[in-house]
Image: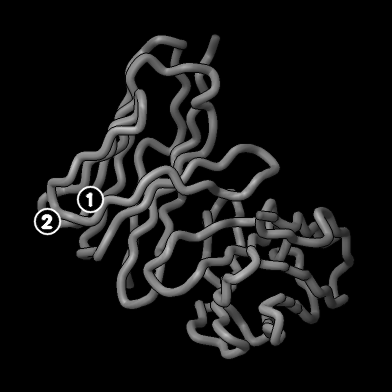
């Protein structure tokens, strides 16, 4: 069974630009969560989607948005990039609530 | 706001030594999970503890959930270079998962 796939692995953008990250969950998993990981703040929850609906949301500004498609693939968009958005963005999928999370390898975003 | 504090933040020890890392909170969690993350990869779940006082063993790793379900510890016996990585604890409850900032462990050969 293929794991969680995130694309691209690396991205370099400049301030003010926008970026879209993609995540393909494990086949059969309907829940996809997104996390931001930085050395200073650790792993912070962005949002979770289940069956195309946002189920939970973390404390991030509206510049961070996401969506989930009918095949459970998910995208995360960040608009008007800031230097502080430089981070590893991780996607995780699971079968449902109370199930274990499976993480992808992440997208390393650098904002210059 | 639920918070998980992990200590120490960094730990560098010689191969063969024993170590314990801690995960503490003032909040009660339904369960506590431990993950290991290696450079360039996402976290991988090692274990989930659910019952207060529960102890689980995974080869040389021993995980314990506090009686009050607010804290947990991870003990590694005879550490190996392959144990090197970032160890994250995560508390679950109300459909949410809260992560600690992690303990970065480096085992010197």
Tags 2 and 1 touching, CB below 8 Å: yes
Residue A31: % across, % down: 55, 75
| Circle 2 chain | B
Residue A7: give x, y in percent of width and height: 81, 61
Q: Nearer the viewer, residue B3 or A89?
A: A89
Quarter where residue B32 is shown: bottom left
**A6 versus B37 height, above or below:** below
Position of the C terminus of chain A by quadrant = bottom right
**Left or right: B39 as drawn, with respect to B60:** right
Q: Secondary structure at mark 2?
A: loop
- The chain under label 1 reads B
Q: Which residue is mark 2?
A: B68
Residue that appears at 37% across and 68% down = A98
Q: Residue at x 61, y 54 (%)?
A: A38
- State the residue at coordinates (31%, 36%): B74
Mark number, residue B71: 1
Question: Could you say which is closer to the camera, residue B27 or residue A22?
Answer: A22
Report, in whole angstroms, how far the alpha carbon at label 2 lies from the one at label 1. Answer: 8 Å
Residue at 22%, 50% in the rendered image: B71
Task: Please tell me how crowded label 1 is: few (under 14), some (14-19), or many (20+) other residues with Cα within 10 Å.
Answer: many
């Amino acid at each position: 069974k293929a794991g969680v796939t995130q694309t691209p692995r690396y991205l370099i953008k400049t301030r003010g630009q926008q970026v879209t990250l993609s995540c393909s969950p494990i086949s059969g998993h309907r829940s996809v969560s997104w996390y931001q990981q930085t050395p200073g703040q650790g792993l912070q929850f962005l949002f979770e989607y289940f069956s195309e609906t946002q189920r939970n949301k973390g404390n991030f500004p509206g510049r961070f948005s996401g969506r989930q498609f009918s095949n459970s693939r998910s995208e995360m968009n960040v608009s008007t990039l800031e230097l502080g958005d430089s981070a590893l963005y991780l996607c995780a999928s699971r079968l449902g609530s109370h199930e274990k999370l499976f993480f992808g390898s992440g997208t390393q975003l650098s904002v210059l | 706001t639920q918070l998980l504090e992990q200590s120490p933040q960094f730990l560098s020890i010689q191969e063969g030594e024993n170590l314990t890392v801690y995960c503490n909170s003032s909040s009660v969690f339904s369960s506590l999970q431990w993950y290991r993350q290696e450079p360039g990869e996402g976290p991988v779940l090692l274990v989930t503890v659910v019952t207060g006082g529960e102890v689980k063993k995974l080869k040389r790793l021993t995980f314990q959930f506090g009686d009050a379900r607010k804290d947990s510890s991870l003990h590694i016996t005879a550490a190996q270079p392959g144990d090197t990585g970032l160890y994250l604890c995560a508390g679950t409850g109300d459909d949410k998962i809260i992560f600690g900032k992690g303990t970065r462990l480096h085992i010197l050969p």
